[in-house]
Image (spheres, rainbow, N blue to C red):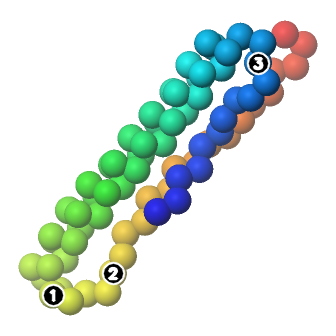
Amino acid sequence: MTLQYPQIDGLDDKTVQDGRNSIFEKSAVGARNEGLKNADEMEKAMASVYPGSPNKCETYFDYRLKYKQNG
């Protein structure tokens, strides 16, 4: 499993920086946990209908960074 999420670096206020980075990390971990839950549920559902199925489950957690110019 690979998690990718943004991380802020270089702010003068380290407390603000760490707070924002914590929010990004918590969101990524939440998406990971939801993906694991969905994969487990899919595996249980598939096992009863298609035992030994090679199907796999993937979760994508994406982000977009926006830059606000002039303030």
Question: Along the polypeptide, which appears first: circle 3 or circle 2?
Answer: 3
Residue at mark 3 to residue at mark 1: CA–CA distance = 53 Å
User: In the rendered structure, which amino acid carries the disc numbered 1?
Assistant: Pro
Residue at mark 1 to residue at mark 2: CA–CA distance = 11 Å
Q: Secondary structure at mark 3?
A: loop
Residue 57 shown left or right of residue 2 in the figure: left
- Compared with 42, 25 (above or below) is above
Residue 49 shown left or right of residue 40 in the figure: left
Residue at left offset 51%, top offset 36%: 25
For label 3, count other residues whose C-alpha is less than 10 Å away and answer few (under 14), some (14-19) or many (20+). few
Residue in the foreground of this view, choosing between 40 and 17: 17
For label 1, count other residues whose C-alpha is less than 10 Å away and answer few (under 14), some (14-19) or many (20+). few
| Residue position for label 2 | 55
Residue at left offset 63%, top offset 13%: 16
Question: Along the polypeptide, which appears first: circle 3 or circle 1?
Answer: 3
Q: Nearer the viewer, mark 3 or mark 1?
A: 3
| Residue position for label 3 | 11
Residue at mark 3 to residue at mark 2: CA–CA distance = 44 Å
| Residue position for label 1 | 51
Is the C terminus in the top left, top right, bottom left or bottom right quadrant?
top right
- Compared with 31, 11 (above or below) is above
Q: Nearer the viewer, mark 3 or mark 2?
A: 3
Q: Secondary structure at mark 1?
A: loop
User: In the rendered structure, which amino acid carries the disc numbered 3?
Assistant: Leu
- Compared with 46, 68 (above or below) is above
Q: Position of residue 6 (x, y in %)?
A: 65, 39
Residue at left offset 55%, top offset 33%: 24
Q: Position of residue 51 (x, y in %)?
A: 15, 87
- Compared with 51, 28 (above or below) is above
User: In the rendered structure, which amino acid carries the disc numbered 2?
Assistant: Asn
